[in-house]
Image (tube, grey):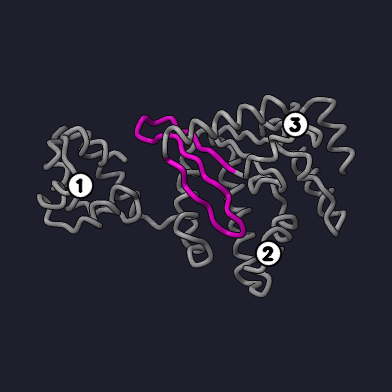
Amino acid sequence: MALRSMRLRRNYSLEDVRSQMEWSLSKVVRIESGTVSISVNDLRVLLSLYGVSDPDEVAQMIDLARLARRRHWAAEYREYVSASYMDFLGYEDDATQISQYHPFLIPGLLQTEDYARLVVTAGPHYRNDSQAAEARVRLRMARQARVFAAGRRCRVRVVLDERALKPVHRPDVMRNQIRKIVDLLPDLDLVILEQNTAAETGFVGPFSFHEFDSDLDPDVVYLDNQPDDVALVEDADMVDGYKASFRALYGQAVPGDSDTARKILDRHH
């Protein structure tokens, strides 16, 4: 994103960079999209092309390039998830606010291990692949540990739909799941959407939007595509639309620490 911003400030097109650097066009696109990292030597030449000469700025960019080439914490799970999901994890690592809604399931950041295993193995994709299923469960638990790590400055907001509290074939799983949600309070900004809320809320599919402190990181939305993928939405107007949807859902819900919320959770416990 920083490199793209520098290119645009110089009014260079992708083709201009390709020609000057003698790269393929796909290499330029993949570097700017974050699909591939850039070597320090290539970065120095590219920064020169963009007229970046301030030593501090050059040093900062080189540090970012070296950081980007380090092994990602979730690299061991790469064979079990899509490239778009790996990108999602990167955004989640950097977000200062994460907002999630799912109309029918407990959102992944709140799931217990047993509940996550039920979700992962319910569909046909992992029904006969226990190794992949367990890897996905471990990845989900690792995500939670990072997002809710002590000292991390990240606000997590979740609209929990009461329909997601429906019974499962093992009652202890849902009891433990509800207990975990309660234990996350007050670190978790939770609201509960009662099941008798206006029907229009059911028209909104599962999504998560991530917000960042840096001006170089525009807010993004990820759509939860079952069973094992996510789709990125970067268009500013669409992102704003999802933000408006979240505000509407959040506004119709009851605070997680209210008496009404406690009665709802007790009813399904």
- State the residue position of label 2: 123
Left or right placement of residue 6 versus residue 179 in this view: left
Disc assigned to residue 198 = 3
Q: Amino acid at mark 1?
A: Leu
Spatial CA span between label 1 and label 3: 47 Å
Question: Which residues are the magenta region?
Answer: 207-234
Q: Position of residue 261 (x, y in %)?
A: 81, 30
In terms of secondary structure, where does tag 3 sit?
loop
Q: Residue at x 53, y 65 (%)?
A: 80
N-term mark: 3 or 2: 2
Spatial CA span between label 3 and label 2: 29 Å
Q: Amino acid at mark 2?
A: Gly
Spatial CA span between label 1 and label 2: 42 Å
Q: Position of residue 196 (x, y in %)?
A: 81, 34
Q: Position of residue 79 (x, y in %)?
A: 49, 67
Q: Amino acid at mark 3?
A: Ala
Q: Residue at x 49, y 37 (%)?
A: 95
In terms of secondary structure, where does tag 2 sit?
loop
